[in-house]
Protein backbone atom coordinates (compact mmCIF):
# COMPACT_ATOMS: atom_id res chain seq x y z
CA UNK A 1 0.00 0.00 0.00
CA UNK A 2 1.25 3.45 -0.92
CA UNK A 3 1.42 5.44 2.34
CA UNK A 4 0.96 8.70 0.45
CA UNK A 5 -2.60 7.59 -0.39
CA UNK A 6 -3.53 7.05 3.26
CA UNK A 7 -4.84 10.59 3.76
CA UNK A 8 -6.99 10.31 0.65
CA UNK A 9 -8.36 6.96 1.80
CA UNK A 10 -9.19 8.38 5.24
CA UNK A 11 -11.04 11.30 3.65
CA UNK A 12 -13.04 8.89 1.47
CA UNK A 13 -13.91 6.78 4.52
CA UNK A 14 -15.06 9.91 6.38
CA UNK A 15 -17.20 10.94 3.42
CA UNK A 16 -18.82 7.50 3.21
CA UNK A 17 -19.57 7.54 6.95
CA UNK A 18 -21.19 10.98 6.67
CA UNK A 19 -23.34 9.76 3.77
CA UNK A 20 -24.39 6.67 5.72
CA UNK A 21 -25.27 8.78 8.78
CA UNK A 22 -27.40 11.09 6.62
CA UNK A 23 -29.21 8.11 5.08
CA UNK A 24 -30.12 6.84 8.55
CA UNK A 25 -32.37 9.89 8.91
CA UNK A 26 -34.51 8.51 6.07
CA UNK A 27 -35.11 5.17 7.80
CA UNK A 28 -38.36 5.37 9.77
CA UNK A 29 -39.67 2.65 12.07
CA UNK A 30 -42.57 2.37 14.48
CA UNK A 31 -43.11 0.41 17.64
CA UNK A 32 -46.45 -0.03 19.33
CA UNK A 33 -47.91 -1.53 22.46
CA UNK A 34 -51.28 -2.13 24.02
CA UNK A 35 -52.81 -3.12 20.71
CA UNK A 36 -51.87 0.23 19.21
CA UNK A 37 -52.73 2.29 22.28
CA UNK A 38 -49.23 3.78 22.15
CA UNK A 39 -47.15 4.17 18.99
CA UNK A 40 -43.60 5.46 18.83
CA UNK A 41 -41.82 6.61 15.67
CA UNK A 42 -38.02 6.64 15.46
CA UNK A 43 -35.44 7.13 12.70
CA UNK A 44 -32.42 4.97 11.88
CA UNK A 45 -30.23 7.10 14.13
CA UNK A 46 -32.47 5.99 16.99
CA UNK A 47 -33.85 9.46 17.51
CA UNK A 48 -37.37 9.55 18.89
CA UNK A 49 -39.57 11.48 16.46
CA UNK A 50 -43.12 11.06 17.70
CA UNK A 51 -45.22 9.42 20.40
CA UNK A 52 -48.91 8.87 19.75
CA UNK A 53 -51.21 7.95 22.61
CA UNK A 54 -54.75 6.86 21.79
CA UNK A 55 -57.40 8.87 23.62
CA UNK A 56 -58.72 5.69 25.22
CA UNK A 57 -55.27 4.95 26.66
CA UNK A 58 -54.94 8.49 27.95
CA UNK A 59 -58.30 8.38 29.70
CA UNK A 60 -57.56 4.93 31.14
CA UNK A 61 -54.25 6.28 32.45
CA UNK A 62 -56.02 8.87 34.52
CA UNK A 63 -56.42 6.21 37.17
CA UNK A 64 -53.18 4.31 36.46
CA UNK A 65 -50.30 6.39 35.11
CA UNK A 66 -47.94 3.43 35.60
CA UNK A 67 -49.81 1.49 32.92
CA UNK A 68 -49.31 4.33 30.43
CA UNK A 69 -45.63 4.59 31.33
CA UNK A 70 -45.23 0.85 30.72
CA UNK A 71 -46.95 1.12 27.33
CA UNK A 72 -44.65 3.97 26.31
CA UNK A 73 -41.57 2.00 27.39
CA UNK A 74 -42.70 -1.12 25.52
CA UNK A 75 -43.43 0.81 22.32
CA UNK A 76 -40.13 2.70 22.59
CA UNK A 77 -38.14 -0.49 23.08
CA UNK A 78 -39.82 -2.11 20.06
CA UNK A 79 -39.05 0.94 17.91
CA UNK A 80 -35.45 0.95 19.17
CA UNK A 81 -35.00 -2.72 18.21
CA UNK A 82 -36.45 -2.08 14.76
CA UNK A 83 -34.25 1.00 14.27
CA UNK A 84 -31.15 -0.97 15.33
CA UNK A 85 -32.00 -3.80 12.93
CA UNK A 86 -32.66 -1.38 10.07
CA UNK A 87 -29.44 0.56 10.72
CA UNK A 88 -27.41 -2.67 10.87
CA UNK A 89 -28.96 -3.93 7.63
CA UNK A 90 -28.25 -0.57 5.97
CA UNK A 91 -24.61 -0.65 7.10
CA UNK A 92 -24.17 -4.23 5.84
CA UNK A 93 -25.77 -3.39 2.51
CA UNK A 94 -23.66 -0.28 2.02
CA UNK A 95 -20.44 -2.04 3.02
CA UNK A 96 -21.26 -5.00 0.81
CA UNK A 97 -21.92 -2.84 -2.23
CA UNK A 98 -18.72 -0.88 -1.63
CA UNK A 99 -16.46 -3.82 -0.80
CA UNK A 100 -18.18 -6.62 -2.69
CA UNK A 101 -15.79 -6.48 -5.61
CA UNK A 102 -12.80 -7.04 -3.36
CA UNK A 103 -13.82 -10.62 -2.49
CA UNK A 104 -13.35 -10.02 1.24
CA UNK A 105 -14.78 -12.68 3.56
CA UNK A 106 -18.18 -11.68 4.89
CA UNK A 107 -18.97 -9.12 2.18
Image: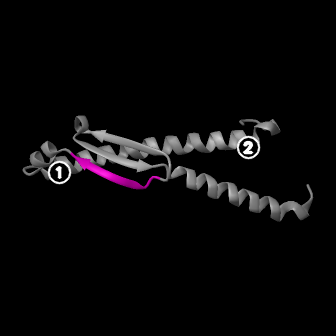
Which label sits on residue 98?
Answer: 2
- Badge 1 is on which residue? 66
Instruction: Locate residue 44, reporting x and y percent.
Output: 49, 49
Kindly identify the residue that appears in the image at 37 percent across and 42 percent down: 30
Q: Residue at the front extreme? A: 26
Check the image and name the residue furthest to the right.
2
User: Looking at the picture, does residue 83 appear above or below residue 1?
Assistant: above
Quadrant of the rendered structure where residue 71 is?
top left
Residue stretch rendered in magenta on the structure: 46-53
For label 1, the crowd category at 10 Å Cα-Cα, with few meaning under 14, some 14 to 19 and many 20 or more, is: few
Q: Magenta region's main secondary structure?
A: strand
Mark 1 falls on what kind of element? helix
Q: Left of 17 or right of it: where is 103?
A: right
Residue nearest the observer in this picture, 106 or 90: 90
| Quadrant position of the N terminus in the picture | bottom right
Q: Is residue 95 left or right of residue 2?
A: left
Measured Cα–Cα span from mark 2 to mark 1: 48 Å
Q: In front here: 4 or 23?
A: 23
Task: Count up the numbered dots.
Answer: 2
Name the secondary structure under disc 2: helix
Residue extending farthest to the left is: 63
Q: Residue at x 82, y 62 (%)?
A: 8
Residue drawn where x is 35% and y is 41% of the image: 31
Circles 2 and 1: CB distance less than 8 Å? no
Q: Quadrant of the C terminus?
A: top right
Amino acid sequence: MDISKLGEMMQQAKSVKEQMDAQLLDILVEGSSGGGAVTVRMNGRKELLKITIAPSAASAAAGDITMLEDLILAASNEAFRKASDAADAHARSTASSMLGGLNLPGF
